[in-house]
Image (cartoon, rainbow, N blue to C red):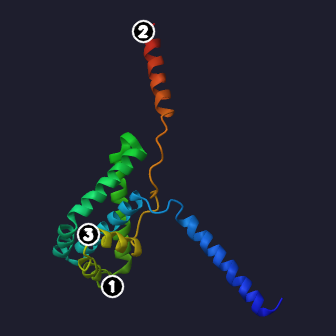
Amino acid sequence: MSFSRFLAAGAVAFGVLHSTVTLAATPCGHSPAHEAFDIQALKSELMVTALSCNAQDRYNAFVGKFRSTLLNEEQKLNTYFRSTYGSSAQREHDDYITQLANIQSEKGLQSGTIFCMQRIAMFDEVNALESSEDLANYTEAKDVTQPASFETCAAPASSHSARPARRATKAKAKTTRRA
């Protein structure tokens, strides 16, 4: 095999492997939950930046400009957590928000004094955006830190098999007590 054929074969193999890895990294495609997680992560990163870099007025301007989009995406997150975690949805959602802020704050602490110089420009970038679609595209393109413990796919169909089993056990226990 000539060197050029070997190189070409290597390039094709790399392309196949790269496309497979890309597909594996995004098995769910673009879901409403994925977009909501991205926007929540951006909002959190901007908040951490505002608090760390004394730019609360710029954060407030961002929230004011995109208030309806942020509320809409928050509703999508609420729906995701309710359908995924049921009665523990609020606790799981709160845990996610806490993990998100913690990991982003930690990243800022690791960056040291350069953090503000690196991140403050994000306020100029989001200020230049005009629509919720622009914001969604921006968050998708931006490498915003997320905790590793969440799924961005649409919530799985709830399995009702576990709930009736627990109810049946409780009913059985009540029947036993009466006897």
Residue 105's mark? Answer: none
Q: Mark 1 points at which residue?
A: 114
Q: Quadrant of residue 1?
A: bottom right
Q: How crowded is mark 1: few (under 14 residues within 10 Å), some or many (20 or more)?
A: few
Report the amino acid beneath label 1: Ile
Could you say whether the residue bearing mark 3 is in a helix, strand or loop?
A: helix
In the rendered structure, which disc, 2 or 3, sits on the residue that comes first in sequence? 3
Q: Looking at the image, is 107 positioned above or below residue 24?
A: below
Q: Which residue lies furthest to the right in this view?
A: 1
Q: Which amino acid does label 2 sit on?
A: Arg
| Circle 3 crowding by C-alpha within 10 Å: few under 14, some 14–19, many from 20 | many
The picture places residue 31, in percent across and down from the top left corner, at 43, 59
Question: In terms of sequence position, does the residue under pointer 3 or pointer 1 come before the other?
Answer: 3
Q: Position of residue 19 (x, y in %)?
A: 60, 72
The picture places residue 12, in percent across and down from the top left corner, at 69, 80
- Identified at 48% across, 22% down, the residue is 168
Residue found 27% across the figure and 74% down from its top? 49
Q: Name the residue under label 3.
A: 47
Q: Does residue 40 show up? A: yes
Q: Which mark is residue 178?
A: 2
Q: How many residues crowd mark 2 within 10 Å: few (<14), some (14–19), many (20+)?
A: few
